[in-house]
Image: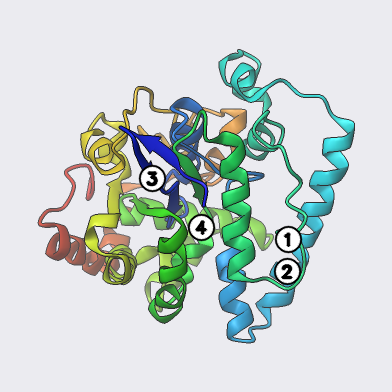
């Protein structure tokens, strides 16, 4: 079993599972831990939705074939590009001025010197948990001199139910030192960014109407921060799960994550969502998935309306963690 040595002791490689939440700066967090501090490496992309694909397969969901076909397509695309391109090394790219603004996240990891294999077995039909494990163990073999472990930043992991998480936990723990992070953001602001993105994707530009409709019914899974935390910590234990408040982390409160990871964080990546500038946010090309989300301003009246319908999210957070972040509700 691949392992690294710390103080003469063999250790399992870290597998960091970041369980969303979408529109809470998962990409800047990924950059921080993978590019800027070289703690974990995600392989060919930030996330691939493989675990959700396994769940969809188990449940015989109509989503399964779509997920499977996307993985196969991604594998074919990777192999074609690898044969045609000669890119800067991962470290050179990380240090170069060209990197900022000219490289999308998937390009940075896909073409790094740390991708030594095509992952053909992983990016193929017939999804299995063993393929998932083998992919990260194989990848770890190539990066273990520079990284502590590997990571999966698939936002779809937020949708996995507790019984499925329980069914895969033993095998993951057998092969990895599993660490789980969840990053959250002011619930109203996060949902507003999500509404902006969804309204764009379906061809109209009225996120205000959409979000008012959302808060009157069942909101998407990413809203329920404490539910996500409880289901993952109930399976893996609270000692393996860490909640990151986006606004606090980018304000410099990083020690709790350092302690959780057991690894120094010397640099924090840019984050379009902090400080929150809404429609006036900086347009970093490599964070286009962030600044494209807010094209309509969130005014005080709308914020108060949304908070009225979402106050339970703030209350639930306080019940579990003992406080509400100061930067929320403003």
Residue 222 or 108: which is nearer the viewer? 108
Dot in front, 1 or 3 = 3
**Number of other residues with Cα within 10 Å of mark 3, as a class: few under 14, some 14 to 19, many 20 or more:** some
Q: Give the mark nearer the N terminus: 4 vs 3.
A: 3
At a point 60% along the width and 78% down the height, the residue shown is: 56
At a point 51% along the width and 57% down the height, the residue shown is: 155
| Rendering coords of residue 35 (x, y %) | 52, 29
Report if the CB atoms under discs 1 and 3 are less than 8 Å apart.
no
Dot in front, 4 or 3 = 3
Q: CA distance from mark 1 to mark 3?
A: 31 Å
The residue under label 3 is 11
Report if the CB atoms under discs 1 and 2 are less than 8 Å apart.
yes
Q: CA distance from mark 3 to mark 2?
A: 33 Å
The residue under label 2 is 68
Secondary structure of residue under mark 3: strand
Report if the CB atoms under discs 1 and 4 are less than 8 Å apart.
no
Residue 287 or 197: which is nearer the viewer? 287
Dot in front, 1 or 4 = 1
Q: CA distance from mark 1 to mark 4?
A: 15 Å
Dot in front, 4 or 2 = 2
The residue under label 4 is 155
| Rendering coords of residue 41 (x, y %) | 54, 39
**Number of other residues with Cα within 10 Å of mark 1, as a class: few under 14, some 14 to 19, many 20 or more:** many
At a point 57% along the width and 50% down the height, the residue shown is: 137
Q: Give the mark nearer the N terminus: 3 vs 2.
A: 3
Report if the CB atoms under discs 3 and 2 are less than 8 Å apart.
no
Q: Quadrant of residue 246?
A: top left
Q: Compared to 25, does 204 lie above or below?
A: below
Q: Give the mark nearer the N terminus: 1 vs 4.
A: 1
Q: Is residue 150 visible?
A: yes
Secondary structure of residue under mark 1: helix
The residue under label 1 is 71
């Amino acid at each position: 079993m691949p392992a690294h040595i710390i103080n003469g002791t063999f250790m399992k490689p870290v597998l960091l599972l970041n369980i969303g939440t979408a529109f809470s700066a998962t990409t800047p967090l990924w950059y921080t831990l993978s590019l800027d501090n070289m703690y974990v490496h995600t392989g060919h992309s930030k996330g691939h939705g493989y675990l959700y694909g396994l769940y969809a397969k188990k449940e015989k969901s109509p989503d399964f074939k779509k997920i499977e076909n996307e993985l196969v397509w991604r594998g074919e695309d990777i192999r074609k590009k690898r044969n045609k391109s000669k890119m800067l090394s991962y470290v050179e790219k990380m240090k170069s001025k060209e990197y900022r603004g000219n490289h999308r996240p998937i390009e940075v990891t896909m073409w790094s010197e740390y991708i030594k294999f095509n992952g053909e077995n992983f990016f193929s039909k017939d999804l299995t948990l063993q393929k998932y494990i083998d992919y990260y163990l194989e990848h770890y073999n190539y990066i273990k001199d520079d990284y502590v472990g590997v990571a999966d930043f698939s936002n779809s992991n937020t949708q996995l139910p507790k019984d499925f998480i329980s069914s895969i936990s033993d095998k993951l723990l057998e092969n990895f030192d599993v660490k789980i992070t969840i990053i959250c953001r002011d619930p109203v602001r996060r949902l507003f960014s999500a509404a902006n993105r969804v309204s764009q994707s379906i061809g109209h530009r009225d996120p205000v109407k959409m979000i008012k409709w959302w808060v009157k019914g069942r909101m998407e899974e990413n809203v329920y921060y404490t539910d996500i935390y409880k289901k993952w910590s109930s399976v893996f234990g609270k000692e393996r799960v860490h909640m990151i408040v986006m606004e606090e982390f980018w304000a410099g409160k990083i020690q709790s994550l350092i302690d959780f990871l057991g690894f120094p964080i010397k640099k924090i990546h840019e984050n379009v969502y902090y400080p929150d500038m809404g429609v006036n946010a900086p347009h970093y090309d490599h964070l286009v998935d962030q600044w494209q989300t807010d094209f309509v301003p969130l005014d005080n009246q709308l914020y108060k309306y949304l908070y009225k319908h979402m106050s339970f999210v703030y209350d639930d957070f306080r019940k579990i963690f003992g406080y509400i972040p100061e930067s929320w509700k403003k």
